[in-house]
Amino acid sequence: MSLRFQGLCKSYQGKTVFENISGSINDKDKIGLIGINGIGKTTLARILAGEETADQGEVMLSPADSKILYIEQYPVFDDNISVYDELFRLAISDSSSNISDVETKVKMTLNKVGLDQLKWGQRATSLSGGEKTKLALCKAMVSSYDLLILDEPTNHLDLKSYDWLEEFVRSLDKPILVISHDRYFLDNVVNKIWELSAKGIKVYPGNYSDYKVQKENELKTVTREYEKQQMEIRHLKEVINERKNWYENAHKAAGTHDFYRSKAKKHANVFKAKRKQLERIEK
């Protein structure tokens, strides 16, 4: 499957979250979505998953009936549904297997993430933050989907569940988009980094460590370019001041003499051209 999005814009109450965001997700992609807090990572994920709509732009799936499973950062469950029933109703709706096989799969999945039988009859809403995360992640094991989107999936997980999640994501043969601040997790599960900023999405091949090396090299390049520009700006300002002084002196001395007036005009043209050049660089 593939997912493409183009020109996405989103605002809340007149405040722009992001604008003109474009990108694509393909079969072999395991993408880590990073960026500063508040830049719109969760909003973008929800739009791609169909949980929200963009103000502008489009999201295109191929095939068109491809299914996306979105596991949100703060799972919400119905008030009166039990831990077991929450997972069972999802598994049975997504399965062509018989009830007995589905029940076995649900029980194995709950045990695997550390939600033992004592928890199964408990209301899902009464679980702790970490247990809710585990239950939500169980959905990825019992559901059918073509693209998995995870929003901060390692939050509140104990070490055993963390290791299980890492192994599951690495072994999954479907494309994944994961929002995470966990550098270790991203190092071990992704093959591409999306950096979301106000300028859009920049794609970096490799895991998080690869991304850091590329960013450091970019910073060095930008620093060199900046220093080069500063030297050019200083030189231009010197030329501008020099030509301006020449022009003022030549203009005063020229009087009505055409030759000197022509020289003064030449200095003025150079002065104006250099000033425009300086304005372009500073901009």
Image (cartoon, rainbow, N blue to C red):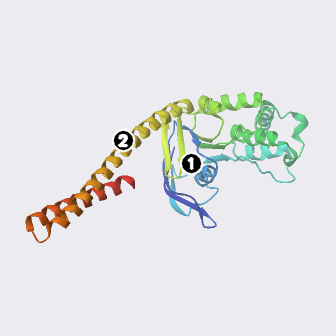
Q: Is residue 199 above or below residue 168?
A: below
* Residue 196 vs residue 275, the one in the foreground: 275
Please state the horizontal and vertical placement of residue 116, each as a whole percent of the image: 86, 33
Please state the horizontal and vertical placement of residue 200, each as a whole percent of the image: 50, 51
Three-letter code for the amino acid on which mark 1 is drawn: Ser
* Residue 265 vs residue 214, the one in the foreground: 265
User: Taking 260 as reference, is 204 left or right?
Assistant: right
* Residue 282 vs residue 127, the one in the foreground: 282
- For residue 168, say whether it is visible: yes
Circle 2 residue:
228
Q: Which quadrant would residue 32 be assigned to in this image?
A: top right
In the rendering, which numbered label is found on residue 77? Answer: none
Circle 1 residue:
66
- For residue 145, say whether it is visible: no
Please state the horizontal and vertical placement of residue 231, each as a whole percent of the image: 35, 43
Distance from Cα at disc 1 to Cα at disc 2: 50 Å
Pair 1/2: label in front: 2
Give the crowd class for mark 2: few <14, some 14-19, many >=20 residues within 10 Å: few
Q: Is residue 249 above or below residue 190?
A: below
- Please tell me whether mark 1 sits on a helix, a strand or a loop: loop
- Please tell me whether mark 2 sits on a helix, a strand or a loop: helix
Please state the horizontal and vertical placement of residue 63, each as a whole percent of the image: 51, 49
Location of the C terminus (image quadrant): bottom left
